Amino acid sequence: MSSASPTRPLVPETFSARLVEARMMGPRVRHLAFERADGAPFVFEAGQWVQLIFPLTDDKGRAVRRSYSIASPPLGTPRFELAVTKVDDGPGSSFLHDAPVGLTLDVKGPAGTFTRALETAAPSLFIATGTGVAPFRGMIHDALSKGRTEPLWLLFGVRSPDELLYGDELTALSKANPCFRFEPSLSRPPDGWTGRGGYVQTHVKALWSELTSAHPGAHAYICGVKKMLTASREVLRVELGVDRKQVHLEAYD
């Protein structure tokens, strides 16, 4: 039997995947784990996305399709995980929030270039809001499981503690791995909150300056809504003069 790792197809393929696990994370986000129905390994790079094809049609009679970042690391198994926010009047997200374990959907993927090659990986500041944390969860687990030790800092913004997706998991990872630092920020912090407050872009300058004082070749990865992405990019590129090759972007709206 060959010990070589399976290779990712050059063109995204379409395959069937079965929902094998589902749980709510906060009031509007559902974590979903799928496995390829054929049992073959699902080969992807941390940070990529898949497109789900629903048994629904739009007003033009076309199949409803939605794309979601993969929230898990590549493990060479049939499994991949997603974090899906329920959108009011959103047919795809509503379908997924009601989907029972055992449901099978057609999936196309993987796709996307919002990735971080470990062979050449630099110290990194990850900046996310909401389900924009999904690709970073995959990148962080991928790096740590492979023994990487370069600094990985995650600045993650949500409104309230119950919206801190994977918060307990990320906190535990930060305690167990000195190279990983978790910096949650709440825009509506409750009484007693001792962490960062306000929008994430207000913390980018300080964290980037601290990281690059010791690691001048660091890179920034930003994923979330366009308003946050634009504001954070403005801080990095305009205020701090960071080279565009060191700033990587993935918009969610």
Image: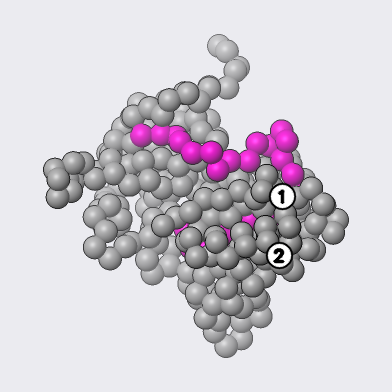
Decide if residue 93 is on the left or right side of residue 147. left
Q: Write the residue at 51% across / 33% down.
A: 44
Q: Write the residue at 67% across / 57% down.
A: 237
In the image, residue 80 lies at what x, y percent?
Answer: 45, 40
The local secondary structure at tag 2 comes to helix
Near-viewer residue (160 or 214): 214
Q: Write the residue at 30% across / 55% down.
A: 93
Decide if residue 221 is on the left or right side of residue 225. right
Decide if residue 68 is in sight here: yes
Residue 94 forms part of the magenta stretch:
no
Kindly identify the amino acid type of the residue bearing the numbered disc 2.
Glu
The local secondary structure at tag 1 comes to loop
Residue 126 forms part of the magenta stretch:
yes
Q: CA distance from mark 1 to mark 2?
A: 12 Å
Q: Write the residue at 38% across / 27% down.
A: 13
Residue 114 got which mark?
none
Residue 239 got which mark?
2
Total number of numbered labels?
Answer: 2
In the image, residue 26 lies at what x, y percent?
Answer: 43, 67
Is the residue 208 above or below the residue 158 in the image? Answer: above
Quadrant of res 167: bottom right
Is the residue 185 above or below the residue 136 in the image? Answer: below
Residue 243 got which mark?
1
User: Which corner quadrant holds the N terminus?
Assistant: top right
User: Which corner quadrant holds the C terminus?
Assistant: bottom left
Looking at the rendering, the stretch of residues picked out in magenta corresponds to 108-133
Q: Residue furthest top?
A: 1
Kindly identify the amino acid type of the residue bearing the numbered disc 1.
Asp
